[in-house]
Image (spheres, rainbow, N blue to C red):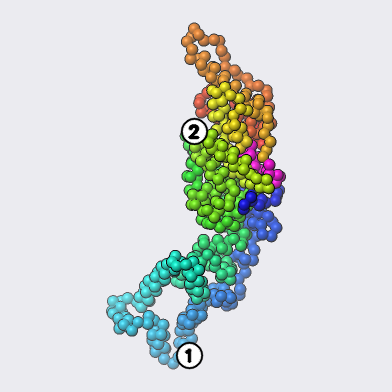
């Protein structure tokens, strides 16, 4: 991942209806190895055809439970332990059934001499032998689970993994037994690399696949993008629905709106937490998720995928997952931008940091700009950059400074342009920063500043004593060039809209009546 990420080739950006936006059909390359959707399972997934009933896997585990209980307990035979089928055969061929049952109980019961004389006391108390043996079994299983966890955390890595591998080899044939399955799953959970043959057996059986821990599933997913896509697809769809529900909620207000939750609060959402757990420390799975997000963003233009891309990275950052953060070239940039979003303002210090990251993109690593632009396209990032731009313009009025002379303002515009151009950059696969329109800086922004001056002038005049007041009327027209900028430049439209929102919060009726008609000529791609 050093030096930039491998981007998906440009694919047709066909708009889809809302219910299809998060489906991963076509979320990656349709060529071999690309992410595929739920309808494109390969033969390696849980839905793959299993061997015929009665056949056994290469590791001695039953491949199907078609024979019912007999298949479930068939693994006991491999360990030399008698099961129900053995008892059935014994009773079929014996001449004295009671004596045969007694002998079977003696040979397969708890082999403690002192126990045989104590069992009749349980009979006197009406305690069934089954209940007694079940309690002993449960206790032994719990002790075994504790021991497995202890082995996984003590001694040298090579030694403990060798013990776990040996234990897995001996116990895997019992993986179908519900009572012993937790032990087998626990052993696999603590193994950093489960033998491939056993992973395939688990993957080919839906019940086993569902029962195994996420640590085991990660090992399956990293070599099966289609299966991982099936798992991720519902989460992405849920995320988009949640964002759209929050955006169009009827309960929004000035004090509590779409942008109110802090970045940390948003990262506690169910989808982000589940994706974080699914990825763990696996760089390959992280790259797969990013590939899904890039391609879905390209196909749908839905900017909420950009939000999820940033939230996932910062969620892993909070868990100190260095394996991923250290190799993602966008990590420090996203971390700095996240702090700005939290404060809802880009100060001079952080502006210099962000500029350093952009200027630090080396030749040959330009593809990093694709990821950076996607992170800047996050609506929460655009909101912060736009609010900061309006605030800087007001400060420049007080300082009597032109926009072109403010490095911080120029950087904000640079970041805004990069974020707004994210889709075009990914679609064209041309990783260059968008060229800044000079007239935007030399004409449009000074016009906005003149509106601020008009406000101040009018307000000061209104506060003067009556005898000192001049016959000043508030301007009610807009320069024709202003509406032209709103029509032709997306950034002008963005900044203009945020300025109108600013004066609306200030309850500035005169400025609102003057500027609001101009928004009717907004940029067509806004």
Q: Earlier in the sequence, mark 1 or mark 2?
A: 1
- Magenta segment boundaries in residue numbering: 416-432
Give me the residue at 66% from left, 59% from top.
33
Element carrying mark 1: helix
Q: Residue 439: which quarter of the image? A: top right
The answer to whether residue 48 is above or below residue 485 is below
Q: Any mark on residue 254, and which?
A: 2
Q: Any mark on residue 274, and which?
A: none
Q: Report x, y in % for residue 179.
A: 45, 71
The answer to whether residue 422 is above or below residue 286 is above
- Farthest bottom residue in view: 95
Give me the residue at 49% from left, 35% from top.
253
Q: Report x, y in % for residue 171.
A: 49, 74
Q: Quadrant of the C terminus?
A: top right
Element carrying mark 2: loop
> Would you name the residue on which mark 1 appears?
93
Spatial CA distance of label 1 from label 2 is 84 Å
Q: Nearer the viewer, mark 1 or mark 2?
A: 2
């Amino acid at each position: 991942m050093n030096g930039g990420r491998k981007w998906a080739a440009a694919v047709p950006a066909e708009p889809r209806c809302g219910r299809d936006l998060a489906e991963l059909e076509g979320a990656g390359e349709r060529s071999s190895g690309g992410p595929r959707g739920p309808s494109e399972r390969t033969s390696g997934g849980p839905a793959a055809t299993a061997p015929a009933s009665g056949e056994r896997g290469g590791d001695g585990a039953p491949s199907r439970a078609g024979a019912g209980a007999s298949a479930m307990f068939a693994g006991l035979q491999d360990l030399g332990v008698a099961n129900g089928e053995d008892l059935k055969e014994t009773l079929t061929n014996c001449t004295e059934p009671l004596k045969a049952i007694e002998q079977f109980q003696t040979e397969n019961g708890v082999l403690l001499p002192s126990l045989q004389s104590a069992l009749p006391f349980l009979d006197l108390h009406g305690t069934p032998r089954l209940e007694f043996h079940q309690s002993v079994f449960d206790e032994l299983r719990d002790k075994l689970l504790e021991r497995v966890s202890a082995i996984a955390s003590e001694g040298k890595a090579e030694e403990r993994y060798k013990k776990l591998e040996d234990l897995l080899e001996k116990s895997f044939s019992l993986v179908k037994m519900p009572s012993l399955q937790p032990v087998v799953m626990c052993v696999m959970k603590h193994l950093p690399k489960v033998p491939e043959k056993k992973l395939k057996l688990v993957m080919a059986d839906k019940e086993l696949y569902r029962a195994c821990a996420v640590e085991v599933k990660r090992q399956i997913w990293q070599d099966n993008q289609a299966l991982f896509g099936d798992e991720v697809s519902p989460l992405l769809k849920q995320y988009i629905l949640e964002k759209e529900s929050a955006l169009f909620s009827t309960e929004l207000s000035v004090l509590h709106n779409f942008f109110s939750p802090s970045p940390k609060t948003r990262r506690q959402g169910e989808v982000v937490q589940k994706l974080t757990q699914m990825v763990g420390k696996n760089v390959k799975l992280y790259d797969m998720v990013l590939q899904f997000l890039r391609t879905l963003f390209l196909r749908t233009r839905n900017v909420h995928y950009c939000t999820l891309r940033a939230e996932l990275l910062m969620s892993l950052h909070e868990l100190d997952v260095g394996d991923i953060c250290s190799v993602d070239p966008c990590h420090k940039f996203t971390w700095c931008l996240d702090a700005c979003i939290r404060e809802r303002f880009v100060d001079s210090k952080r502006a210099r940091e962000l500029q350093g990251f952009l200027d630090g993109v080396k030749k040959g690593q330009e593809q990093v700009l694709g990821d950076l632009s996607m992170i800047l396209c996050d609506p929460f990032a655009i909101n912060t950059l736009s609010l900061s731009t309006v605030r800087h313009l007001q400060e420049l009025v007080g300082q009597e400074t032109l926009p072109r002379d403010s490095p911080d303002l120029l950087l904000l515009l640079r970041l805004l342009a990069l974020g707004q151009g994210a889709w075009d950059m990914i679609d064209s696969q041309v990783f260059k920063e968008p060229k800044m329109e000079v007239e935007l800086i030399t004409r449009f922004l000074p016009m906005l500043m003149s509106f601020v001056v008009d406000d101040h002038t009018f307000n000061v005049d209104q506060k003067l004593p009556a005898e000192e007041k001049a016959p000043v009327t508030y301007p009610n027209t807009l320069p024709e060039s202003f509406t032209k900028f709103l029509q032709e430049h997306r950034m002008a439209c963005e900044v203009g809209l945020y300025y109108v929102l600013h004066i609306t919060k200030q309850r500035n009726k005169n400025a609102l009546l003057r500027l609001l008609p101009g928004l009717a000529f907004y940029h067509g791609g806004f």
